[in-house]
Amino acid sequence: MLTPEIKRARNAILIGYISNGIALGSFIARIPDFKRILGVTDGGLGSALIFGSIGVVLSLGPAGRYSAKFGSKPLIVGSAIGVGITIPGLGLLFNIYTLAIALFIWGITLGVQDISLSAHGVALEQQSGKKMLSTMHAMYSLGSIIGVASGGVIAQLGITPLAHLSVIGVLLVLSAFLINPLLLPASMDQHNPDGHKRNRKRPKIFWILGLLGICAAISEGVASDWGGVLARDTFGASPFVSAMPYALFSALMVIGRLSGDKLSRRFGTSRLLTAGGLIAGIGLSAGMLMNNIQGVFLGWFFLGVGVSAVIPLLMSAAGEIASKEYPDRIAPSEAVAMIAGISYFAFIAAPPLIGFLSDQITLRLALFVPAGLALMMAFGARYARSSDH
């Protein structure tokens, strides 16, 4: 049941996810300026950027544990302030090393914010009996689009990254104070930390859900990094047309996540994951078999439709299974962090692995790998059935 308190907390989480997405999108929009100002090569910039991902990955486990110990509310507010305080540091740009350090610290705050928001969202689902995490993640995707679009305009106006990101930082800090009174109390999702310390071995079901997350995360990573390369280098598309597959994919991610909660309530998480895996796997395979630019758009269309809601649905399922079946072994927030950690690692590892494989057999043929993994996800989705109502 959606009480007024739950509605307020849900709106707070939606604001939190929009701000998280705006932060990341604003940063992405200024990456070309980072390279220009620092005068580094693509390889040098890439080496610095990976530190942001490392910071995110390292933060996920502790974020889950501390959300269980102290409740997710203080971590949401604290990490939102942290993201706002640290994002201007990305614009200092003294040298490539200070950028790497700033990215690492900022990545930690982003990761904590992401997990604590998801933990609060899972708790709201359990209290209300309503699925809502997919819609919350849609707000992150929407925020990213807003951040990239506005950041591109600001960069075009010649405003420095430091000034731009400082303003974004102030807005993020203000958002933390805005959502603080709307969130449910920390006691709402605190769990027994001593019991979890005694039972560090995680039930197999969470590793299985994590493997399903890998299948979806690899598809997301491939869609973001390789659509433009495939369109331009393999099929001779223009720079504008080459950017369109990912734009299509991003739009479908927002639409799919906005629909994910409603569809999950109607058909169940496991059925939705099965359908998504089949759509993504068969659609991407069909697109690659067409062997033309139209096939790229077709493949990316079905990839976006199929995997859009998978990660938030898996997080929701993990939190529910932890709460119902393993309350003395793992907190819902820790289960969410576990799924996020496994999935995010696959997200950042997949693009270079596909790149290596493409050198051996061509990029078009390498993309049958994520298509096959999507089909594997479809057949493994039955393990999420215990989270269905």
Image: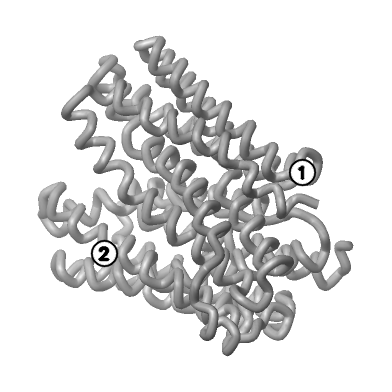
Residue occupying image coordinates x 39% and y 52%? 154
On the picture, is 186 further left or further right than 301?
A: right
**Nearer to us in this view, 214 or 251:** 214
Residue 180 spot, x, y in % from top left: 66, 79
Seen in the picture, residue 253 relative to 77 is either above or below; the reply is: above
Residue to which mark 1 is pinned? 262
**Nearer to us in this view, 5 or 15:** 5
Residue occupying image coordinates x 50% and y 57%? 207
Residue occupying image coordinates x 41% and y 77%? 85
- Where disc 1 sits, the SS reads helix
Numbered tag placed on residue 168 in the rendering = none
On the picture, is 343 further left or further right than 326?
A: left
- Where disc 2 sits, the SS reads helix
Residue 251 spot, x, y in % from top left: 55, 36
Q: Could you say which quadrant of the image residue 341 lies in? A: bottom left
Seen in the picture, residue 28 relative to 92 is either above or below; the reply is: above
The amino acid type of the residue labelled 1 equals Lys
**Nearer to us in this view, 173 or 369:** 369
Residue occupying image coordinates x 43% and y 73%? 109
> In this orientation, does residue 31 appear?
yes
* Figure quadrant of the N terminus: bottom right
Mark 1 or mark 2: whose residue is earlier in sequence: 2
Furthest toward the bottom, the residue is 194
Instruction: Say few, some or many: other residues with alpha carbon within 10 Å of mark 1 (under 14 / 14 to 19 / 20 or more).
Output: some
Distance, label 1 to label 2, CA atoms, is 37 Å
Residue to which mark 2 is pinned? 51
The amino acid type of the residue labelled 2 equals Phe
Residue 79 spot, x, y in % from top left: 50, 76
